[in-house]
Amino acid sequence: MVSCYMCDEIAVSVEHVPPRCLFPKQKDLPRGVNLRRELLTVPACAHHNMEKSREDEYFLNVIVGIEGINAVGIEHYRHQVRRQFARNNSLLRRFKSRSFDFGDRLAHRIEIERLDSFIDQLARGLYFVHFGEKWQRLLSWFPEFLSRITEPDPQHERARLSTISRAEEMFSTTPYLGANQGVFTYQVVGTKQECEMRLHFYGTARILLTFPHPLAAHPNHFRALHEQRGAV
Ligand SMILES: [Zn+2]
């Protein structure tokens, strides 16, 4: 009997990590191109494979809005995300209500709690895929792409840039894993007791995950930075 990647319940299905909706459908791609090859899955109980499609969609909406993503992401936005918005008016309204013009760009106020629980689950899923075991302790994540534009904070920005340059260095010789790297790829440094992962969505939207050593203080640098001055 296989148990769920998040809890001790019996697994009744598989869940895709990251969610399948991030990967363009065949019908949106040129003939012969398949970006849904060998998608990663984990065993999940009914609760943890719950209807989290809304959270998946929210994450997709955030990630395809990031400046500098590759053509795969931009095309995916044009097809899939527009379809989602057309289908789900409340999703569109909610998203729009948090978006605003900022100079010549469109900015978005992230729903951080929502992103937090989504990424926590995603991180545990990837850990399970990679090590074949559950991660049962706290972990932390850092969105490299997120900066404060309405309340610029030099200290926060310096910390963000230094985290990014540390990550660039740490992962510079580490292989990129995953079959559809234009959509998603990840790197791992460390062991199953203690590791860091760097996730890359559509080339340039990156999230750093820290799975700390059992004796380490919980190094939630992202939380710590954001709690100083309220949410983004
Ligand atoms: Zn479960």
Image (spheres, helix red, strand yellow):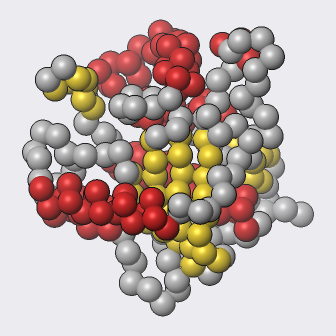
Whether residue 177 is visible here, answered yes or no, is yes
User: For residue 187, which quarter of the picture?
Assistant: bottom right
**Residue at 77% in and 11% down:** 31
Callout count: 0
Please state if 117 lies on the left or on the right of 228 as rendered.
right
User: For residue 127, which quarter of the picture?
Assistant: bottom right
Residue 192's place in the image compared with 111, above or below, is below
**Residue at 16% in and 26% down:** 102
Q: Nearer the viewer, residue 66 or 173?
A: 173
Q: Nearer the viewer, residue 141 or 94?
A: 141
Q: Position of residue 13 (x, y in %)?
A: 79, 46
Residue 140's place in the image compared with 193, above or below, is above
Residue 178's place in the image compared with 183, above or below, is below
Going by the picture, which residue comes out furthest to the right? 1
Q: Nearer the viewer, residue 130 or 171?
A: 171
Of the 4 image quadrants, the one containing the N terminus is: bottom right
Q: Position of residue 161 (x, y in %)?
A: 28, 57
Please state if 53 lies on the left or on the right of 155 as rendered.
right
Q: Position of residue 96 (x, y in %)?
A: 29, 21
Q: Position of residue 21 (x, y in %)?
A: 62, 30
Whether residue 15 is visible here, answered yes or no, is no
Q: Nearer the viewer, residue 90 or 30?
A: 30
**Residue at 73% in and 58% down:** 129
Please state if 75 lies on the left or on the right of 43 as rendered.
left
